[in-house]
Image: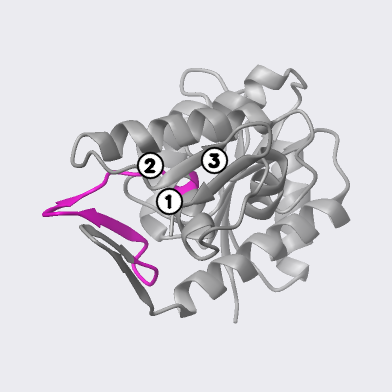
Amino acid sequence: MQYKILIVDDDTELLKMLRSYFEIRKFTVITAENGAEALEKVSLVPDLILLDINMPHIDGIEVCRRIRDQISCPIIFLTAKVEEQDRVNGLLSGGDDYILKPFSLKELDARIIAHLKREERHKAKSEFKFHGELMIDYSSKKVQLGDAYLELTKLEYDIIEFLSMNPGQVFDKERIYERLCGYDAEGDSRVITELVRRIRRKMAKHTENEYIETVWGMGYRWKN
């Protein structure tokens, strides 16, 4: 399968280098030099987006916020910043991963392939889970409570999917993050805390039942 990726960065030399590398790797490559151009080119339905955070006018986080409800493909942020809050903000905006500049092409390639393969496995699923008033459609990645579908970010849905497919098992925040994002998540566990809080808040609008249980000092588990 030939994958299509959208690469967004205001560094034109980096864009040229990445285009050349991934075209050699048999990807279809679309490029954009700013956030406004990226918003236009998402209509080409890429399989994955590489998105620079630090761009003028419309930065990468704002681009991600605007497109996340319309597109479900993995989004990997490219960033020169190393502050934890920048990484947290990027992931909470709907991103799936990030890689720091300067980066190794081999590592970037490996991250991209891991996310694309994970996405293929998600698409291959066709199961449903019913738990009282809750229904999870693993094929379309939708969660329904009663008559309402929850409006979830990709990572929020991924947490529900991971925990619900392993009911009763306790996972610490670092393990959940690593399972979802595919790499060592040391220092980023508070992202999971915030995402679980958001999931619970969205569920609480439609039910008094709590599906994700906190096991104090250990992590979270899906109630049987």
Identify the image quadrant of residue 208. top left
Q: Range of the magenta residues? A: 137-155
Q: Find residue 156 and report its horizontal and vertical position in percent.
A: 45, 44
Q: Position of residue 201 (x, y in %)?
A: 32, 31
The three-letter amino acid code for the residue at tag 2 is: Ile
Residue that sits furthest to the left in the current view: 147
Q: Residue drawn at (52%, 55%), measured in percent from left and top?
A: 163
Q: Which residue is mark 1?
A: 157
- Whole-percent x, y for residue 9 in the image: 63, 36
Badge 3 crowding class, 10 Å Cα cut-off, few under 14, some 14 to 19, many 20 or more, is many
Asked if residue 187 lies left or right of residue 159, the reply is right
User: Relative to 108, is 115 above or below?
Assistant: below
Left or right: residue 61 compared with residue 138: right
Closer-to-camera residue (194/58)? 194
First reached walking from the N terminus: tag 2 or tag 3: 2
* SS at mark 3 in the image: loop
Horizontal side, residue 60 vs residue 129: left or right: right
**Residue under circle 3?**
95
Tell me the tag on residue 186: none
Say how many tags the image has: 3
Q: Nearer the viewer, residue 22 or 69?
A: 69
Under mark 1, the amino acid is: Tyr
Numbered disc 1: secondary structure? helix
Camera-nearest label, 2 or 3: 3
Residue 141 located within the stretch drawn in magenta: yes
Q: Nearer the viewer, residue 29 or 113?
A: 113
Q: Quadrant of residue 110?
A: bottom right
Residue at 38 percent across and 72 percent down: it is 139
Quadrant for the C terminus in the image: bottom left
Name which residue type carries label 3. Gly
Name the residue located 74 percent from the left edge and 51 percent from the top edge.
18
